[in-house]
Image (tube, coloured by chain):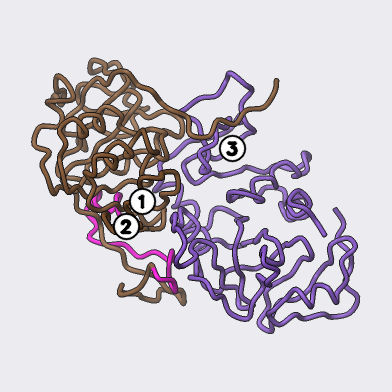
Amino acid sequence: MIKKTVANVEEALEGVEDNMTLMLGGFGLCGIPENSIAELVKRNVQNLTCISNNAGVDDFGLGLLLKQKQIKKMIASYVGENAEFERQMLSGEMEVELTPQGTLAAKCQAAQQGYPAIYTPAGYGTEVALNKETRMFDGKMYVMEHAYKADFAFIKAWKGDEAGNLIFNGTARNFNPIMCGAAKITVVEVEELVKPGKLDPNQIHIPGIFVQRIFQGKDYEKRIEQLTVREA
Amino acid sequence: MLDKNGIAQRIAKEVKDGYYVNLGIGIPTLVANYVRDDIQVEFQSENGILGMGPFPIKGEEDPDLINAGKQTITALPGASFFDSAMSFGMIRGQHVDLTILGAMEVAQNGDIASWKIPGKLVKGMGGAMDLVGSAKNIIVAMTHMNKYGDSKLLKRCNLPLTGVQCVKTIVTDMAVLKVTEEGFKLMERAPGVSVEEIKKATEGTLIVEGDIPEMKL
């Protein structure tokens, strides 16, 4: 076994510097790497390019980095939940690259799996495809999209072992598995870190080969963005 | 004229036994409330669940279990979870049978605009471009006119496009229409709405053949 554990979040974020490109898992506030985001805020690294499906809310998730103006460029599919984000986007302080959600996922997975680019029908004939190579396959038009290149990927998993094997929970899975191994260094925080052998190899969602650092996370808030319930 | 629930109720009749269905945010979400309970249907939410159930009972909500609108939901027996790449693989690979989504404009060639008003705040396209770029069958749920009284069924879209030549069916508060090579073909009228009124509310070419039946809800 190759051990991937680090002692804490400080050690996990060793080497994160200004001007880097970061991938961050999560959909809305579901399955976001809360501990790593808090540490990025603490380190106050600047001029970051962040690849994440959403940009958090004003006082949580990536919104915390926005508040400190740490993000130079945001690559996301939907950013509608954050007033400070809107302000920085409209004032031109921050660059925003809106990308179709499935394309965003495919560009992460391509980076993970060694494809330089993929073809997708999403966005063909729209402004998303401007200045991009297009090509016809079997009579249908596709847009070529390049794999992302990132320095760090910050991942949140439910359970993980010391070898970096991961299991996700519910819809907190989302972009997390496909960002593993899609950056030079993949940092994973887990709700429960266990000894090797404690996880059933049949149930592993992401093998440890895609992970460089794993640590036991703490104090999870797991905020709910839209609480919708029915009466019993 | 139909209200939002009426539009959803009419669209629910297009959901057939054995269908996997992706519902967009807004009116499409309401469709789930009207699907017959004697057929087998699974709802997909693109953030990574098949077999999505109703909202949880108060107190049983789980922050790790949401839909693409970020609402807390439940998983029905037989449900599955998966990552975003696999989710859009289901969509791009045309394994999802029906996509129901909202729109700001639809053109008579099937173009759809639904994500951006230039000069106004842009929130992003989310999964809409992937859905309209690949779906086998797309039904648009929307009002026939916008709040200024302008038609949303046009010769050509004015707003930035979400996808090209992809919409098959439109259900509005006034009518059911099919996209054909000649234009919007009027299939059904909403209760109490005349063909004349629909003509007046449709900027694109409207094809009216024979008697147009009133919708049955």
Foreground residue among A52 and A38: A38
User: Residue B51: which disc?
Assistant: 3
Answer whether residue B98 is visible to the viewer in this image.
no
Q: Which residue is mark 1?
A: A87
- Left/right placement of residue B94 relative to residue B143 reads left
- Residue B106, compared with residue B33, is above or below; it is below
Marks 3/2: CA distance? 42 Å
Q: Which chain is brown?
A: A
Q: Chain of mark 1?
A: A
Tags 1 and 3 both on a single chain = no
Q: Residues within 10 Å of mark 1 (few under 14, many from 20)?
A: few
**In the image, is residue A185 part of the stretch drawn in magenta?**
no
Percent position of residue A68, x then y: 24, 39
Q: Quadrant of the C terminus of chain A?
A: top right
Foreground residue among A169 and B160: B160
Percent position of residue A229, x then y: 62, 28
Percent position of residue B175, x then y: 78, 66
Percent position of residue A78, x then y: 42, 51
Give me the residue at 21% from left, 38% from top.
Answer: A210
Give me the residue at 70% from left, 23% from top.
Answer: A231
Q: Quadrant of the N terminus of chain A?
A: top left
Give me the residue at 62% from left, 49% from top.
Answer: B26
Q: Which chain is purple?
A: B
